Image (spheres, helix red, strand yellow):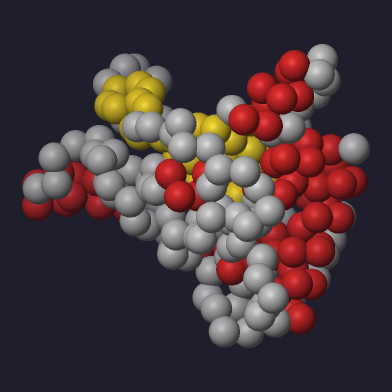
């Protein structure tokens, strides 16, 4: 199953939209020109976001694509959005800047694209992967819950607590069940063999983007 909103979020503080990647690398988009300028880039990521007194940082990898944004800038357009793809549990790949559904709204709205690699995957390693370091992080996470069960502290997009509803960025939407996949196939490059439910999922995302960005 793939709930449409599980692959999309928005923040009011930034003119940005996020996409979640959980599937294999896509084929190049057949209707969008390729841009092979993407290369490994790095930024200083804070190691512990819950401890303001600890300024330790590490290098996290990302990719970017400026094609659509530069085109919009050359046309003196304003309010161009930022699209961020949140890397899944695997190595980040610049193939996602050449394929996938998200390129369609990116081209339409002259978006600046970023793909962020998930920590501890690919080349993004905050700490050395040792038993001692793993145990330290597990103990820290458990202590944060103070002995409570984790599940009541998790906000689910389609559950009774919607973290974005309070911010007023979207209205309640029912889930769409997409056959034959588990995570965010709605983000993959459209093809003629797509199931009706998958097309419906993409249409819902498109309407959401149109409402927010137009």
- Image mark count: 0
The quarter of the image holding the N terminus is bottom right
As rendered, which of 194 and 161 lies closer to the eye? 194
* Figure check: 90 above or below 127: below
Q: What x and y, as percent, mark residue 174?
A: 80, 71
* Figure check: 162 above or below 193: above
Q: Quadrant of residue 45?
A: top left
* Figure check: 203 above or below 162: below
Task: Residue at 68%, 32% (x, y): give it.
Answer: 68
Q: Residue furthest left?
A: 131
Task: Residue at 25%, 52% (x, y): give it.
Answer: 138
Q: Quadrant of residue 166?
A: top right
Q: What x and y, as percent, mark residue 175?
A: 74, 72
* Figure check: 162 above or below 51: below
As rendered, which of 77 and 48 lies closer to the eye? 77
The quarter of the image holding the C terminus is top right
As rendered, which of 64 and 31 lies closer to the eye? 31
Task: Residue at 39%, 48% (x, y): give it.
Answer: 93
Q: Is residue 8 visible?
A: no
Task: Residue at 53%, 69% (x, y): give it.
Answer: 183
Q: Quadrant of residue 48?
A: top left
Q: With 139 as the anchor, is 62 left or right in this view? A: right
Q: With 169 as the anchor, is 147 left or right in this view? A: left
Q: What x and y, as percent, mark residue 144?
A: 38, 45
Q: What x and y, as percent, mark residue 107?
A: 72, 40
């Amino acid at each position: 199953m793939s709930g449409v909103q599980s692959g999309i979020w928005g923040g009011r503080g930034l003119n940005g939209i996020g996409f979640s990647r959980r599937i294999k690398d896509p084929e190049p988009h057949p209707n969008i020109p390729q841009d092979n300028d993407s290369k490994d880039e790095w930024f200083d990521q804070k190691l512990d976001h819950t401890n303001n007194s600890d300024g330790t940082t590490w290098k996290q990898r990302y990719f970017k694509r400026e094609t659509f944004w530069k085109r919009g800038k050359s046309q003196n357009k304003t309010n161009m959005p930022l699209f961020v793809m949140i890397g899944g549990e695997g190595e980040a790949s610049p193939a996602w800047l050449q394929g996938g559904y998200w390129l369609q709204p990116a081209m339409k709205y002259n978006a600046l694209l970023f793909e962020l690699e998930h920590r501890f995957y690919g080349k993004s390693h905050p700490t050395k992967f040792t038993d001692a370091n793993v145990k330290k992080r597990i103990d820290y996470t458990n202590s944060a819950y103070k002995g409570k069960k984790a599940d009541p502290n998790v906000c689910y997009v389609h559950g009774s607590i919607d973290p974005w509803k309070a911010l007023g960025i979207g209205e309640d939407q029912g889930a769409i069940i997409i056959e034959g996949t588990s995570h965010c196939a709605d983000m993959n490059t459209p093809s003629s063999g797509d199931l009706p439910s998958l097309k419906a999922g993409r249409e819902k995302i498109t309407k959401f983007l149109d409402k927010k960005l137009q």
